[in-house]
């Protein structure tokens, strides 16, 4: 089997590349190293590595020749940078996604697995389930949910088998650490190790469902390799633990050296995944517990 991973040198994508190679896949890793929160990128030397933008139709089309599975993770993937530069976020996440889908259509790939975001639920009441209406609070979530709609359209109109995931606050090894907009657990661990106070946004009582990167990888691999009924394509699935913690609880587990900073616009107060659909369809189960992982760091 041959797989292509967009964003394959980044946090989540690099773990998927490693797992696919371990399973014996031929892998094309496609990335342009644009993620500003990444201190480094993870190019696996066993993959066919292509440095390029997902909006580059001709380069991407060439990279996708003979590919069976596409894992689409490349994105402008942070809320606050997208608020600062909405045009770039929409360009990368919408034009880039339709380019991926069109190239996959032309290459006659078996499946496209699209990585989206729990921020699409916005202020919906928790737990968040796949039948809730979209409530996009910022350009990032608008552009990522638009990608979901494109995946569904390519599935229904063009027969491209698509599956799209909404991830709930992914953390783990290789998580971005650079800058103020990196994921919170990475920021806290970096600040602790540097002897700095943990910067808690707002009152710290906002709650998040955190998902270890290995559990995200297993969802992707199952979605690609498991035979599923045609009715399960063109569908949204939550990838989360169905357990959430306040930011204060996370901070207290890492360091008591803390300081509060002003709240941010465009972010939800609570996320909590309803994950039964993913479990039922693909036989997925989350295995890593957040507090156990933090205690080992």
Image (tube, helix red, strand yellow):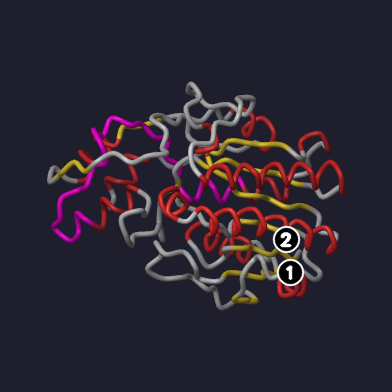
Q: Quadrant of residue 27?
A: bottom right
What percent of the width, then of the height, locates residue 244?
39, 31
Give the residue pinned by disc 1. Answer: 57
Query: In front here: 152 or 272?
Result: 152
SS class, disc 2:
helix
Q: Is 198 within the magenta?
A: yes
What percent of the width, then of the height, locates residue 219?
60, 45
Q: Quadrant of residue 277?
A: top right
Determine the residue located farthest toward the top in the rendered image: 125
101 lies above or below 252: below
89 lies above or below 40: above
Q: Are marks 1 and 2 in contact (CB under 8 Å)?
A: yes
Query: In front here: 164 or 261?
Result: 261
Q: Which residues are magenta?
A: 191-219
Q: Quadrant of residue 74?
A: bottom right
240 lies above or below 222: above
Tell which circle, 1 or 2, labels the residue nearer the N-terminal end: 1
Which quadrant holds the N terminus? bottom right
166 lies above or below 187: above
What percent of the width, then of the height, locates residue 188?
26, 50
Q: CA distance from mark 1 to mark 2?
A: 6 Å
The circle on residue 99 is 2
- What residue is shown at x 20% (from left), y 59% (from top)? 193
């Amino acid at each position: 089997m041959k797989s292509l991973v967009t964003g394959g040198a980044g946090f989540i994508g690099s773990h998927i590349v490693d797992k696919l190679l371990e399973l014996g896949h031929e892998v094309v890793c496609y990335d342009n190293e644009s993620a500003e929160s990444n201190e480094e990128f993870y190019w696996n030397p066993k993959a066919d590595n292509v440095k390029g933008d997902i909006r580059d139709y001709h380069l991407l089309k060439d990279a996708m020749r003979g590919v069976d599975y596409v894992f689409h993770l490349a994105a402008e993937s942070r809320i606050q940078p997208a608020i600062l530069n909405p045009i770039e976020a929409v360009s990368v996440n919408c034009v880039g996604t339709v380019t991926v889908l069109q190239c996959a259509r032309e290459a006659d790939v078996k499946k496209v697995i699209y990585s989206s975001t729990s921020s699409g639920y916005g202020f919906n009441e928790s737990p968040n389930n796949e039948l809730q209406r979209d409530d996009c609070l910022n350009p990032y979530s608008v552009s990522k949910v638009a990608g979901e709609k494109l995946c569904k359209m390519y599935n229904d109109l063009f027969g491209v088998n698509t599956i799209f995931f909404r991830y709930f606050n992914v953390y783990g090894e290789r998580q971005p650490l650079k800058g103020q907009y990196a994921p919170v657990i990475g920021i806290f661990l970096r600040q602790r190790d540097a002897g700095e106070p943990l910067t808690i946004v707002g009152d710290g009582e906002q709650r998040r469902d955190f998902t270890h990167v290995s559990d995200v990888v297993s969802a992707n691999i199952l979605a690609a390799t498991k035979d599923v009924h045609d009715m399960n394509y063109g569908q949204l699935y939550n990838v989360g633990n169905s357990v959430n913690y306040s930011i204060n609880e996370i901070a207290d587990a890492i360091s008591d050296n803390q300081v509060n900073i002003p709240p941010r616009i465009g972010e939800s107060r609570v996320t909590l995944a309803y994950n039964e659909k993913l479990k039922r369809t693909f036989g997925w189960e989350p295995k890593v517990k957040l507090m156990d992982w933090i205690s080992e760091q």
